[in-house]
Amino acid sequence: MSDNAYTPAEREAVYRAIAERRDMRHFTGGTVEPELLRRLLEAAHQAPSVGLMQPWRFIRISDRTLRGRIQNLVEEERVRTAQALGERSDEFMKLKVEGIGDCAEVLVAALGDDRERHIFGRRTLPEMDLASLSCAIQNLWLAARAEGLGMGWVSLFEPQALADLLNLPAGAKPLAVLCLGPVKKFYPAPMLVLDGWAQARPLDELLYENQWGVNQ
């Protein structure tokens, strides 16, 4: 055991938050206290980022009318996605894909503008800005779970339409609509598994050694 390791109880808490994190769609309204929301966003802001570029930008949606317009964009994309799914269209339309109207807080996570000037770590992998923002969202997600709040990541929207709605500058791009707030309970397994949409694959199927496709 490393001398830098946390105590057993602290380690258990970390692994528990990871294991119990869920992409939530069902919320019970309520509020998130400003101090708590700030603490969660500070956790997001402590995420690693390539070249310390910190590409994340968070927009809190406090206007209920604007929240409704965002929800309309999601609904439009939900219908288009169903059409693209073909024979699974009806099955997809039965899924609950967002909780925008019910959650306490809505945040839009976006990539900032002027990212081209950040070359360190991105010369051959420019998409690392997206990876960095994803790390910030995951930090927020885990911190929310530890605080007993649910969070859902909604990606069903046309990025440019949402960018126009929120007056994003040229070069900025929205990546996620985040629903955050109290929930009655957390799903015992991913909702898409519970609803029969998909099955999670075990780690051993996705873990290779030395070469692609060679399992340990």
Image (cartoon, grey):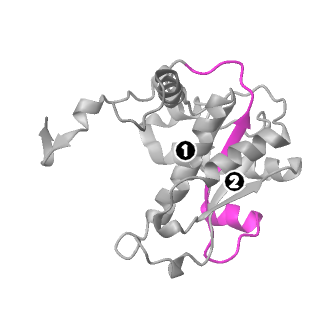
Distance (Cα) linking label 1 and label 2: 14 Å
Label 2: state its secondary structure.
strand
Q: What residue sits right under mark 1 in the picture?
A: 138
Mark 1 vs mark 2: give the one in front.
Answer: 1
Residue denoted by label 2: 108
Q: Amino acid at mark 2?
A: Val
Other-residue count near label 1 (Cα within 10 Å), few / some / many at <14 / 14–19 / ≥20 = some
Q: Kindly identify the residue that appears in the image at 34 percent across and 73 percent down.
A: 124
Can I make out residue 57 in this image? yes
Task: Judge by depth and name the residue closer to the eye, 53 or 4.
Answer: 4
Q: Amino acid at mark 1?
A: Gln
Q: How many marks?
A: 2
Whole-percent x, y for residue 41 in the image: 70, 48
Q: Position of residue 98 (x, y in %)?
A: 66, 38
Quick check: is 86 in the magenta stretch?
Answer: no
Which quadrant, please, contains the N terminus? top left
Q: Which contiguous range is marked in magenta?
A: 158-187
Q: Nearer the viewer, residue 203 or 53?
A: 53
Residue 155 appears in the rendering: no
> Could you tell me residue 96's position as x and y percent?
62, 31
* Residue 31 percent coordinates (x, y): 84, 34
Q: Which mark is residue 9?
A: none
Q: Name the residue at the bottom extreme.
A: 117
